Amino acid sequence: MQKRIVEGVEVQRGSGNVYADLGLPDAEKLKIKTGLVVEIRKAMRALGLTQQAAAKRMGIPQPKVSAMMHGDFANLSERKLMDCLNRLGYDIEIKVRPAAEPIGHLTLAVA
């Protein structure tokens, strides 16, 4: 990360992944899961679904929807979050391509 001084305060440019910047393990997975939850929230809003209606449609208990809406989605896998989006009427496309570096990265692109 780049460091610079702005008005007497040291500022660091983020990497684009706040979880990595905080040194959390599985930062890429956390970023993907966060992106999926953001899309689930948008879908619920666009469809006008209550948490109860969304839970029924996604096939998960309402308390898990509530926890998800409050940022607690550690108990839900990326696969389950993708399944939730599918059940809300969204297609998911997984694209695989050679990486520019020796080890590839996970990214979420939203149309």
Image (cartoon, rainbow, N blue to C red):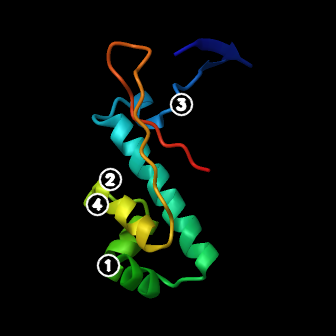
The residues tagged by marks 2 and 4 sit, at their Cα atoms, a distance apart of: 7 Å
Q: Give yes or no for contact between labels 2 and 4 (Cβ–Cβ under 8 Å).
A: no
Report the residue at 44% width, 39% height from top: 95
Instruction: Kindly identify the amino acid type of the residue bearing the numbered disc 2.
Output: Glu
Instruction: Kindly identify the amino acid type of the residue bearing the numbered disc 4.
Output: Leu
Q: Is mark 2 on a helix, strand or loop?
A: helix
Instruction: Kindly identify the amino acid type of the residue bearing the numbered disc 3.
Output: Gly
Marks 1, 3: nearer the viewer: 1
Q: In which quarter of the image is residue 84?
A: bottom left
Return the x and y of residue 73 as percentages of the image width and height: 34, 59
Camera-nearest residue between 89 and 55? 89
The residue where tag 2 is placed is: 78
**Residue 72 visible (yes or no):** no
The residue where tag 1 is placed is: 59
Work out whether 108 lies above or below 21.
Answer: below
Camera-nearest residue between 40 and 63? 40
Marks 2, 4: nearer the viewer: 2
The residue where tag 3 is placed is: 16
Q: Give yes or no for contact between labels 4 and 3 (Cβ–Cβ under 8 Å).
A: no
Marks 3, 2: nearer the viewer: 2
Return the x and y of residue 65 as percentages of the image width and height: 39, 74
Report the residue at 37% width, 44% height from top: 30
Q: In which quarter of the image is residue 52?
A: bottom left
Work out whether 88 lies above or below 73.
Answer: below
Q: Give yes or no for contact between labels 1 and 4 (Cβ–Cβ under 8 Å).
A: no
Instruction: Kindly identify the amino acid type of the residue bearing the numbered disc 1.
Output: Gly
Q: What element carries label 3?
A: loop
Return the x and y of residue 110 as percentages of the image width and height: 57, 49
- Residue 76 marker: 4
